[in-house]
């Protein structure tokens, strides 16, 4: 009963007093399926956003071998980032499908946070499921869980000079303790939202840049598929955000 009541509670507006955000996710398309409308809204407002992808998404298309697929999906990711005003896109080179949660992943993400020095860090659902109206829902992928958890941890690691001292001695990356929030997209328990607004149209085009991936995924018309998916997602958030189509996040303050 309590849980159900919480799931109807209004979402708070996303914090707005920041200049730089870093989005860290497992795969090409993870940001486009969840929160590109928010990214467009923020870059339009003059904020800097950079993307870091743990993998190049090489295991994402059944009919395409990993070497070929990695190059294809990296190019699609760069194109889709450009549509929402993001020109910095980095790939950490972890292996798609079998990303391991642990110190190596945390260190790579902490290094990225130190390089970019964001106040806001964004990632994708780190929980076991995607949730559902009845409390169940689809099982989440192991890569999303590993990366989401490592991002939440690395926000702290980035600020501590003693956890990965080699980042200073080998890469000259001084601690950055300026992350004020980690915002998780696609969780079962969002707390905040930001208006999708005109960013929604850009988000549609951003997701459509994953041409080869979407063509392999569905027989539906790509425009129709993408528009239905993204509109459904912002309408769901609208129900808890004063009727305003929005992108929802679960915000962990630091
Ligand atoms: Zn993914």
Image (tube, rainbow, N blue to C red):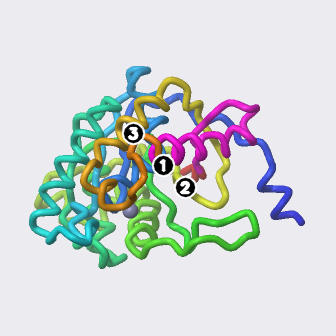
Residue for point 10% across, 67% down: 67
The quarter of the image holding the N terminus is: bottom right
Residue for point 44% across, 50% down: 33
Give the secondary structure at mark 1. helix
Give the secondary structure at mark 2. loop
User: Seen from this angle, which residue lies furthest right?
Assistant: 1
Q: Distance between the residues labelled 2 and 1?
A: 6 Å
Q: Tell me if 149 is positioned left or right of 189 in this view.
A: left
159 or 188: which is nearer to us? 188
Query: Residue 186: which numbered mark, if any?
Result: 2
Give the magenta-colored segment's residue range. 225-249
Estimate how packed mark 2 is, as few (under 14), some (14 to 19) or many (20 or more) residues with alpha carbons within 10 Å: many
Q: Where is residue 207 in the image (x, y as percent from the top left)?
A: 37, 43
Residue for point 39% across, 66% down: 147
Whether residue 125 is in magenta: the answer is: no
Residue for point 47% across, 35% down: 37
Q: Where does ligand 1 appear, by image quarter? A: bottom left
Residue 119 figure quarter: top left
Estimate how packed mark 1 is, as few (under 14), some (14 to 19) or many (20 or more) residues with alpha carbons within 10 Å: many
Query: Residue 21: which numbered mark, if any?
Result: 3
Q: Distance between the residues labelled 3 and 2?
A: 18 Å
Residue 64 figure quarter: bottom left
Number of labelled discs? 3
250 or 138: which is nearer to us? 138
Relative to 104, is 205 above or below? Answer: above
Give the secondary structure at mark 3. strand
Q: Where is residue 138 in the image (x, y as percent from the top left)?
A: 57, 72
């Amino acid at each position: 009963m309590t849980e159900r009541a919480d799931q109807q509670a209004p979402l708070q507006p996303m914090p707005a007093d920041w200049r730089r955000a870093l989005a860290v996710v497992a795969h090409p398309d993870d940001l486009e399926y969840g929160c590109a409308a928010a990214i467009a809204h923020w870059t339009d407002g003059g904020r800097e956003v950079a993307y870091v992808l743990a993998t190049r998404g090489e295991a994402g298309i059944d009919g395409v071998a990993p070497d070929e697929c990695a190059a294809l999906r990296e190019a699609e990711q760069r194109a889709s980032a450009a549509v929402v005003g993001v020109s910095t896109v980095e790939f950490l080179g972890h292996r798609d499908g079998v990303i391991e949660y642990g110190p190596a992943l945390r260190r790579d993400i902490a290094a990225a946070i130190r390089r970019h020095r964001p106040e806001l860090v964004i990632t994708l659902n780190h929980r076991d499921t995607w949730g559902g109206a009845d409390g169940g829902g689809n099982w989440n992928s192991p890569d999303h869980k590993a990366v989401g958890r490592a991002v939440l941890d690395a926000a702290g690691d980035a600020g501590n000079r003693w956890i990965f001292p080699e980042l200073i001695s080998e890469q000259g990356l001084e601690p950055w303790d300026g992350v004020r929030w980690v915002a998780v997209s696609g969780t079962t328990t969002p707390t905040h939202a930001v208006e999708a607004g005109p960013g929604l149209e850009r988000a549609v085009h951003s997701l459509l840049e994953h041409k080869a991936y979407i063509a392999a995924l569905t027989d539906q018309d790509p425009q129709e598929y993408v528009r239905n998916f993204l509109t459904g997602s912002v309408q769901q958030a609208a129900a808890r955000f004063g009727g305003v189509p929005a992108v929802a996040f679960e915000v962990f303050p630091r």
